[in-house]
Amino acid sequence: MKKGIFLLSVILILIAGWSAGWFYVAEKVETVISDTKTRLADRGRDFQCTNQAINGYPFRISLNCDEVLYADEFTGVIFEAGELKSAAQAYQPNKAVVELKPPANLTLPNGDQFNTSWNSMRTSLRAGLSGPENLSLHGKQITFIPAKNPNHTMLVKDMQLHGRQIGDNNVNLAIKLIETRSQNTLWPSFDLSTTLLLEDSYKDIVNRTSILRVAKTKGLKGQIEHFQYSPKEGGMLEVSGPARVSKQGLLSGNFDVTVRDLPKLLTALSKSFPQERQKFADASNAVSLLSKETGKNEITLPITIRDGRISIGIIPLGKLPPLY
């Protein structure tokens, strides 16, 4: 009998201790959210979580919102979406999974607006004492409908974005788009993947909570470790090399560019960017004159870009528009 009472007492103490710990962690999460909203507001950004609620007792810490809004006065980015649900284990609140329900409205820095929907959108996050250490976003069957021209609706079968802290102050980014195409077939279907290293940027990104803010404030520098564009019609473009982006969004760098099946690649690019068809023709002529063969249908050549101006050796190819 005494053993039973003792065991029951221990269980009750453990339950009470766990409950106290859960509510303590939940209160800390609410404090972090409140402090984050204040910090964002002080820097010209607005974050809203309609009908915010924290629950999940006893084993999870869950943050739920009926709607979310993020607006940045400095960059002009506005994002509005539906219900948000996040969950983390009560004993590991620094690791969370977030699900977001459509639809969403997105406004880009240039003012272009998109109505967006998806079948699924999930984000996982792991944070340390200094800020996020790993961030992954995975979306399926995503639709981007331009508000100005719905005929140019873009469809993405699968989208992945991964970011992680490297060393003390570098960031590694990886982006992958699978079967991206326009609904009106203007853009031929393509796959795209890229891996980037952003140098001396982690602390700035955490402090400003936006890569775009960092880019517009001080620019970016780093390495394009891998970039590949593969139209389904054929052809392939690969780029690698050190890169720099100015505060004005102008790209500079020395790149190794590999092209496979150039005629098919240029056909796909000309369909996607008909206004640039002449530039693609000029680039093809320059490649034919200066390139070196590295395979049956593969050509590798050095490309120099200085503040958006592209050249192969002394032959100019044109100019890239600002990236933002």
Image (cartoon, rainbow, N blue to C red):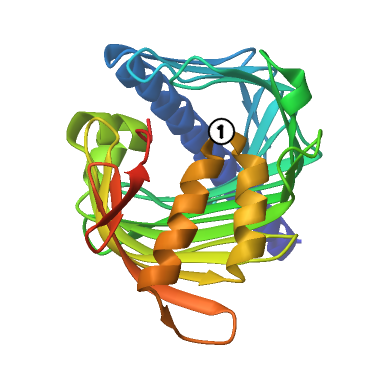
State whether residue 300 is above or below residue 281: below
Residue type at numbered disc 1: Gln
Outermost residue to the bottom: 295
Q: Quadrant of the C terminus?
A: top left
Where is residue 51 shown, x and y percent of the image? 64, 13
Q: Quadrant of the N terminus?
A: bottom right
Where is residue 36 shown, x and y percent of the image? 37, 24
Q: Quadrant of residue 63?
A: top right
Task: Kindly state the secondary structure of the residue where label 1 is placed.
Answer: helix
x 62%, y 45%: residue: 270
State whether residue 209 is above or below residue 239: above
> Which residue is nearer to you in this view: 226 or 59?
226
Where is residue 16 shown, x and y percent of the image? 59, 42
x 44%, y 25%: residue: 33
> Which residue is nearer to you in this view: 20 or 117?
117
What residue is shown with label 1? 275
Q: Is residue 112 visible?
A: yes
